[in-house]
Image (spheres, helix red, strand yellow):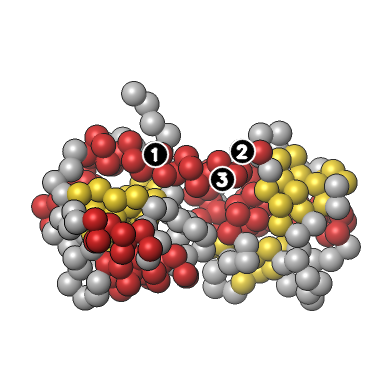
Amino acid sequence: MSRPPLSILLVEDHPTIARQVVAFLEGLKWQLDHAATGALAIDLATREPYDVVLLDLNLPDMDGLAVCRAIKARAPRNVPVLMLTARDAFEDKARGFSDGADDYLTKPFDLRELALRCEALARRSQLHLEQELRVGALTLLPRELRALYDNAPVALTQTGFRILLMLCTEYPHAVSRSALLQHVWGANPPDSDALKSHIYALRKQLDGASGMKMVATIPQLGYRLQLEAVADV
């Protein structure tokens, strides 16, 4: 069965388990990052827009529940967290869910089930985008590739729409250039000048519709959607 490619952060300090999970999911053509410590996991999850975080509860430097709380509080979007653990008591599961976990898989687990759960979590997190996404006066209709500002149409290219969709999804956080390149063009992104050209065109359309500068450049990082009037950057 074909599966849409997902971007996954695996947080697991056991090398054998990590190798098995990475090999299986990469075999599905998914993008995998691996962190063996809670500190690295938090750093990665707050910089990259993953579809799902696979989180082991027993980490060498900090408790997995604390990692889950930090990711939920600081990640650029509400990324689903699937906890992987040998703790199968009801009390342990209840603590995990109360600290922000979206699903729970007890070790040892079938890698095929792990993949199915990742797909379900990613699909659930994107359901709100299928119909309509509202950010301030902006309304995005992903199925129709249409954008409105104060209910008036904004003429965008398909690439411009995809860039704006990610900026709106991650608002109020900034989006890195690398994340935009991967989101819009996948594994074969063009050079950075192409992204700059599309950002320029997107700004021109949004500025004309709103009367203000809506896409701010964040030095050394990328771009962020602005809903208040700002100076030209």
The image quarter in which residue 69 lies? bottom left
Q: Is residue 155 above or below residue 78?
A: above
- Mark linked to residue 184: 3
- Alpha-carbon span between mark 2 and mark 1: 16 Å
Q: Amino acid at mark 2?
A: Glu
- Quick check: 3 above or below 169? above
Of the 4 image quadrants, the one containing the N terminus is: top left
Disc on the earlier residue, 2 or 1:
1
Is residue 148 visible in the rendered image? The answer is: yes
Residue 47 vs 19, above or below: the answer is below
Q: Residue furthest left?
A: 16
At a point 36% along the width and 59% down the height, the residue shown is: 97
Q: Is residue 193 left or right of residue 76?
A: right
What amino acid is found at the position of numbered circle 3 in the picture? Answer: Val
Q: Are marks 1 and 3 in contact (CB under 8 Å)?
A: no
Mark 1, Cα crowd under 10 Å, few <14 / some 14-19 / many 20+, is some
Residue 153 x, y percent position in the rendering: 84, 43
Q: Residue at x 42, y 34 (%)?
A: 4
Q: Nearer the viewer, mark 1 or mark 3?
A: 1
Query: Residue 136: x, y in percent?
Result: 75, 60
Q: Nearer the viewer, mark 2 or mark 3?
A: 2
Density class for disc 3 (Cα within 10 Å; few <14, some 14-19, many ≥20) is some
Label 1: element kind = helix
Question: Looking at the image, do the residues carrying marks 2 and 3 touch, with CB atoms under 8 Å apart?
Answer: no
Residue 213: x %, y % from top left: 79, 66
Quickly name the residue at label 2. 130
Q: Secondary structure at mark 2?
A: helix
Q: Which residue is mark 1?
A: 119
Left or right of 34 on screen, residue 20: left
Name the spot of residue 89 as percent of width and height, x first.
19, 56
